[in-house]
Image: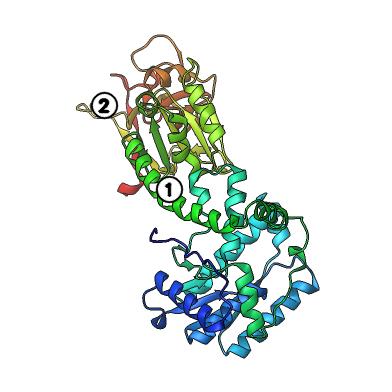
Amino acid sequence: MAANSIPLNSHFLTFVPVMLKAFQKQLLSLENNPAGKKFLLAVSGGLDSVVITELFGLSAFSFGIAHCNFQLRGKESNGDENFVKKLADKSNVSFFSVKFDTEEFCKENKVSIQMGARQLRYEWLEEVRKKNKFDYIVTAHHADDSIETFFINLMRGTGIAGLKGIAPKNGNTIRPMLGFYRKEIEQFSKKNKLKWREDSSNKGDKYERNRIRHHVVPMLEKVNENAKKNILQSIDMLSSAEQIYRDAIKDKTSAFVKKSKTAMEVDFGLFTKNKNAALYLYEIIKEFGFGFEQAALIEACINTEQHTGKIFYSASHRMIIDRKSLTITSQKLETEKNFRVGPGFKMINLGDTYCWFEKLKKTKNFKPAPSSEIAALDFDKLTFPLEVRKWEQGDRFYPLGMANSKKVSDFLIDNKVSILEKEEVYVLVSNGEIAWIIGKRIDERFKVTAATKNLYLCKLQNAIAL
């Protein structure tokens, strides 16, 4: 059995001491010293969370209770909050609660109610955990929840990673009830005469999980009475297989992937050296919200002659296909940076770099710097204020040493400037004419000559170096 596997029960645990012992054993497999830890229980007020509260209380472990009021069911939601507060008081433990405008959050972030509520819940629980120095967040997910998650992910096409059901441990979140079926939890609650709140939304078929719970799983049990047990066994085996799969993916792809703070680059060698390259690509890019279908389309696009410059989007990121690689960056909503530079202006901030300006008298020994990051211009040929802006399609200039003008776009292509880098290229403009493609090349018309009396030095400097 895998290290994070779920214990499979062959019979319902009808006696309270037996279930309590099984619970403690499961918790011990997730934390070898539970008696020395503090646990934050996520309690909705429903059957599962009330039972896990009872199990922690009977075990005399240190715990607190946290409740999220998603305000989705009016008075019923407020009733749940009051019930959980009383449960915390009865257990003589700390109580934490929060109210969310869930519908507004989901509308603004364009996510489903279930996905939005999950995000709000876990982010808040982690804040409470850290602030109050709890060691773990504990949820009351059980075996039936894991089976339902298996089918949800199967229908969504998440691949092998999504077929593991619910993980017993994920970072600081643990789920020590995954070894129990819902019927076992119900029997335990009856034996202990526990009270809980019924969520009316669980009775209908509005949500996908409910439809699976009410119809799919019961139908499978009619076909095979051991269906749930066998599905859990498959989930357990898939968990082990997924780790083997993950290691193989890393072995095949690591040589072709480069990461920086702001981007990920995937070399085309991934496609030329591997069969089933779309699958490898999917495993690399799925964390950025891209699906397998997009990965297949990207592979097909790369195999065409006109692939350079094509862009694919996920909800949060974009992928640009360049000549020899793919580049993935987040979608940033940035306003265009335009600057006016007067004759006495000293510096502007271009994000990762600064551009410094200085007027100097030309000396006899002056020689232009060989670096493209330093531009020496004839001050008296410039018309102030100058403008610094992003380059635009249709821009032209006279590259230093050339008698004829050239499109900036063609100049950047000839100098093998990547598509991503092109987006960050600025130009220094004098009276509508480009005097310098910043960091690349000055214009022939503004160069320093023997007749130059005053210099205008422009220098790029990395922000990190300052």
**Could you tell me which secondary element the residue under label 2 belongs to?**
loop
Q: Quadrant of residue 11?
A: bottom right
**Could you tell me which secondary element the residue under label 1 belongs to?**
helix
| On screen, residue 379 above or below 410 | below
**Would you say residue 384 is visible in this rendering?**
no
- Tell me the number on the disc at residue 355: none
| On screen, residue 383 above or below 282 | above
Which comes before the other along the chain, label 2 or label 1? 1
Q: Amino acid at mark 2?
A: Pro
**Where does residue 45 sit, x and y in percent of width and height?**
67, 76
Q: Residue at x 59, y 67 (%)?
A: 181
Q: Residue at x 52, y 29 (%)?
A: 296
Residue at the far top in the pictured view: 403
Label 2 – label 1 distance at C-alpha: 59 Å
Q: Amino acid at mark 1?
A: Glu
Give neighbour class at mark 1: few <14, some 14-19, many 20+ (Cα, 10 Å).
some
**Would you say residue 326 is visible in this rendering?**
yes
The residue that disc 1 covers is 242
**Where does residue 391 sit, x and y in percent of width and height?**
50, 27
| On screen, residue 63 above or below 73 | below
**Where does residue 397 sit, x and y in percent of width and height?**
45, 18
The residue that disc 2 covers is 368
